[in-house]
Every structure is written in structure tokens, then in C-alpha cells.
Image: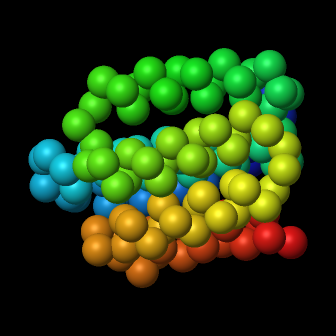
Amino acid sequence: MLGPSPYALASPAFRFPALARAAGRAPVGGPREALLATLLAARLSAAVRPPLALDAAQRARRAAAARDWLGTHLVPAIHKAAVSRVVEASAGTDPAPIAAALAKVTEVTAQWLDRAARLELEALTAEFRD
């Protein structure tokens, strides 16, 4: 039996599979849009800290693109406001506003989150509280 090729690249791991599954299973419309926005918020936040740790210019560009995306999708107002706070906070490096904004996103999206998706968001939030 042959082992792995010495030239093969490591497979990247997606950090939020349960959240992505929740968005895929949600009914079309408000719930799905809210969960997709939550996934966007989680991915923006994850890029603030290692191992991704994008630089300030990259985070600012991603935040601007996220604001544009939020403006073109029919995300329910309460979710849009919560995700907008994460978008703004993710452009900076201060962990406290990111943790608070992620906690609010988790709270307003809780009705559509299963246990695994909620745990992914809570683990991410905890990283910014440490």
C-alpha cells in the first residue's frame, strides 16, 4: 500500500461546517439569509486571529465587501444590525467588540441554530474573550 505523496498538499479544514449545514437546511427567505449572514460574520471574525490573521488592509477590504453583500440581501433587520456590528468590529483588532457582536449574532440567530452550529459560534466568541 502506498502512503501519501510527499508532494501532496494538506487538505484545508473548513472551520464552520455545522453553520454551513444549518444555512443549507434553512427555508429559503429570512432564515436562510440570516444564517448566511451569520456564516459571513463568523468567517470575518475568524480572519482576525491566527491561523488566518489577515492584515488590517485585507480585513478592511473584506468588511467593505461584506457591507455591500448585506445591503443587497434580504436579511431580517435584527440580524442585519447584529451582523453589521461584527463586520465593523472585524475591521479592527480589539477583541472585546468582536466578542460582544458575535454573542449578539448567536442570540438573534439561535432559533435556527442546531447544537453543533451554536457550539461553533460560542467557541469563536470565547476565543475573543480570552
Q: Position of residue 50 (x, y in %)?
A: 85, 48
Q: Quadrant of residue 109?
A: bottom left
Q: Position of residue 75 (x, y in %)?
A: 28, 43
Does residue 80 lie above or below 61 as drawn?
below
Q: Position of residue 100 (x, y in %)?
A: 65, 64
Does residue 116 lie above or below 68 as drawn?
below
Q: Is residue 22 left or right of residue 66?
A: left
Q: Tell which of 71 and 13 is nearer to you.
A: 71
Q: Quadrant of residue 18?
A: bottom left
Q: Is residue 59 left or right of residue 64?
A: right
Q: Tell which of 103 and 43 is nearer to you.
A: 103
Q: Position of residue 59 (x, y in %)?
A: 73, 28
Residue 36 visible (yes or no): yes
Q: Is residue 9 left or right of residue 65?
A: right
Q: Going 81% across and 56% down the picture, which residue do you hit? A: 95
Q: Quadrant of residue 112?
A: bottom left
